[in-house]
Image (spheres, rainbow, N blue to C red):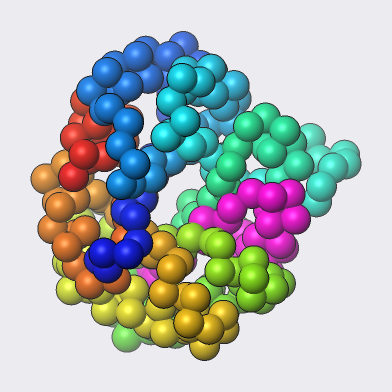
Amino acid sequence: MAAHRRPVFAANWKMNHGPTQAKTFLSEFLVRYAARDDRTVILFPPSITLAAAREGVRARRDIALGVQNVHTADKGAFTGELSAALAADAGAAFVLVGHSERRHVFGETDAQAAQKCARVVEHGLTPVLCVGELLEQRERGETEAVVLQQLRMGISMLAPTAARRMLVAYEPVWAIGTGRTATPDDAATVHRVIRDALAEQVGVEALDIPLLYGGSVTAANAATLLEADEVDGLLVGGASLDAAGWATICST
Ligand code: PGA
């Protein structure tokens, strides 16, 4: 990772930790992880837990919050959905867009990811665009093409000024929740491809865009992954659910 980019540690709780568990989690995590200004920590709780998480981190300006998904519309008759406007009002600063579970479990398209990034930016929030290939795509040698397509489409509705403020997370689908992590070299190779594509789209400021790696990150492999070229942070699912473990990862 480059010295001028502050590392980002992002916790994707997925459908875990309701308000009660979040309170318990935070009371332990905040004791174990003292505020530091050389890194960014972001929690993505379930949206129903956002208010409790916000209350829990009230005294800690160093911890940011986000939501795991938003709808493409701002408001309307979309039962069960959540808009970027609502997320902003509830205290979110970041939004995961195009997470692989959204793409592959819920059938989200690149076009929807593009619309979501646009809505997120319109409401003053920061998108974390997630990209990554399936195992069969990697085996067919399509990793680069898949990732570039998701990236270029995902940012296609953003002005360069907005794209420069976003984050990108590379999460190979075969590494998510499987215990199988990409090697630091695998991650660095794809991150370089992403960085070059971003530079083409937004210019030299692409050097400031944090590129996160995600997929079976643990306290044991976090440091090695962060040492890889172009890996500026980690997006962590399973290993972010335990307060002590997450505090260790954030202290890497
Ligand atoms: P994992 O999930 O760390 O449990 O593999 C990462 C993610 O899906 O963001």
Residue 31 on image: x %, y %:
27, 18
Q: Is residue 90 left or right of residue 40?
A: right
Residue 165 on image: x %, y %:
56, 62
Report how many numbered discs are placed on residues in the image: 0
Viewer-side residue, 150 vs 94: 94
Displayed quadrant of residue 159: bottom right
Which range is magenta? 108-134
Residue 58 on image: x %, y %:
51, 20
Displayed quadrant of residue 164: bottom right
Q: Quadrant of the C terminus?
A: top left
Viewer-side residue, 22 vs 167: 167
Give the vertical position of 85 relative to 48 (above or below): below
Q: Which residue occupies 38% across, 40% down? A: 41
Q: Which residue occupies 57% across, 48% down? A: 95
Q: Quadrant of the N terminus?
A: bottom left
Verify whether residue 117 appears in magenta: yes
Residue 220 appears in the rendering: yes
Q: Is residue 197 left or right of residue 124?
A: left
Q: Which residue occupies 54% across, 24% down? A: 54
Give the vertical position of 166 relative to 230 (above or below): above
Viewer-side residue, 206 vs 103: 206
